[in-house]
Amino acid sequence: MKNKLIVFFSVCLLLIPLTLTAKGSGDQGNVSGEEVTLEFWTWRTEDVEFYDKVIDAFQKKHPKIKVKQTAIKNTEYNTILSASLQGGGGPDVFMGRAYGGLKPLADSGYVLALDDLVPELKSYSEPAKSGARSVTDGKIYGLPALSQAIFCYYNKDVYNKLGLKVPTTWAEFISNLETCKKSGIVPLANGSKDGWTVETLMGGIGPNFYGANDFFNAVTTGKTTFEDPRFVEAVKKIGELRPYMPELFTGVGYTDIQGSFINEMSAHMIGGSYEAGTFKAQNPSLAFDVFPVPGEKAGTQYVTFYADMNWAVNAATKQKDAALTFLKFLGSKEVGNMIVSELKMVSSVPGVDTKLDPFVGKVITLLKNSTSYIFLVPFRYEQPTGSSLWQAAGQGFLSGSLTAEEACKKVQDGIASYYKPFQK
C-alpha cells in the first residue's frame, strides 16, 4: 500500500507542471479546454467586415473560442434582442444600448453586471461609464465601447469650387446653403422620414441656440422646461432649413441621406461622428470635413456628445468565461486602435492612439466644447421617452402640422407625466 501511494503522488507531481503549462499557454477563457462557439450580435450592418477582422484577431489568440457574428438592422435590433433574451436565448456577447436603452435589460436581469468581473473598468472615464451604469442599482452593465459627437459634415470640393468658407454664425451657414442651392447642388442631405434622424438634427443644431450646458442643467433639474423660449427658438431654427433640404424631404430616410452625401449629390449633412468610416469605405475619394452648426453669434460653438454603445454579456450565457474573455478583447487597446484607424470613431478604451486618424483627432478637439445629447442622456429611462416624444413632434413640426410651440408642448407634457422635477 505504501509503495502504491508513493507512485500515486509521484505521478501527481509530474502532472502539475504539465497542467500549469497547458493552462498558461492555452485558452484562458475556456476553462474546460473544449472548443466553444459564442454568438455575437451587433446593430452595425455596415461594419460586418470590421468585426470579422476583430473576430479573426481574437481567434488567433484564443483558437478554441469560435465567434459567430450576427448583424441586425439598427431599427429592429432592440426588439429582436429583447425578445430573444426574454425567451432564454439570444447572443452571448452583444452591442448594448447606452443610458435608458440599457435599463430594461439590466432591470430584467438579462445582462451581467461587470463591476466585479472586469477590473479594467476602473480606468475608464466617468462620461464613458455613465452610459453603461444602471440608474436603478448603480452597477455597470456594459464595457464602454464608443463615444460620438454630432455636427455638420461638408463637402470640401464643393466649398472650394464655390469659394465658401466654414461658417462661424448661423447667417453665414444659411448663406452657404443658399449659394449651394443657386448652384444646383442639394444644400443639405437631411430628411425627416426616420424619427431618429430628426433627433440628430436637434443634436446638431440645438445646443448653440438653447444654451448648451446651461439649458441642459436647468431643464434636467426642473428649473426650466422644454417650453422655454430658448428651446422653442432652437426648434424654429431647424425649421429654417426646410428650403435647403431635398425635395419631399419628409419621405427621405436615413440611407437616402447617407447616399446623397456619399455620392456627392449634396453639400452638407448633419450627422454623427459614426458616419465618417462609412463615407470613406463607400467613397474613398470623398473630401469632407466637419464644423459645429453655429449659433447666431461667432465664438465658442458646442457639439453634442454621448456614449454610444457598450459591450454586454448575456446573464444566461452557458459560456461565461469565454464570453468575458471576448468582451475584454473588445475592450483592449488593440481593438480600440482598430476602431480609431478603421472605423474613424472615438474609442472609449483608455490609452488608445488617437493620432491614428486625423478625423478622430478633429472630433476630440471639437469635444472640448461639448454638451450632452439633450433627450438621449437624461430622458430615455421612462415611457414615453424624451427621444420618442421629440422625434414624433419634430416630424410634425417639419411637415407643417405642428408649430414650434406645439411641438415643444407635446414634449414637455409627455416627459412631465413621469419626470418629478417637472411636477413641482
Image: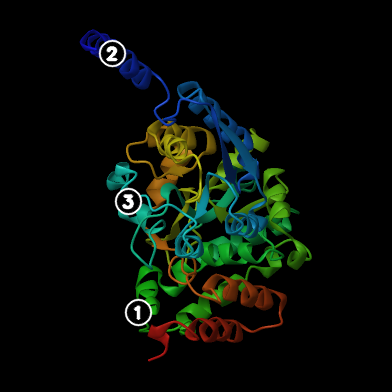
**Residue at which label 3 appears:** 115
- Kindly report which numbered mark, 3 or 2, lies closer to the viewer in this rendering: 2
- Kindly report which numbered mark, 1 or 3, lies closer to the viewer in this rendering: 3
Earlier in the chain: of badge 3 and badge 2, it is 2
Q: Position of residue 263 (x, y in %)?
A: 72, 43
Q: Residues within 10 Å of mark 1 (few under 14, many from 20)?
A: few
Give the quadrant of residue 424: bottom left
**Residue at which label 1 appears:** 221
Q: CA distance from mark 3 to mark 2?
A: 42 Å
Q: Is residue 371 above or below residue 279?
A: below
- Seen in the image, is 401 located left or right of residue 406? right
Q: CA distance from mark 1 to mark 3?
A: 28 Å
The reply to whether residue 25 is visible in this rendering is yes
Q: Position of residue 276 (x, y in %)?
A: 56, 43
Which residue lies most toward the front here?
A: 1
Q: Looking at numbered disc 2 in the image, what kind of residue is underneath it?
A: Phe
| Secondary element at tag 3 | loop
Q: CA distance from mark 1 to mark 2?
A: 71 Å
**Residue at which label 2 appears:** 8
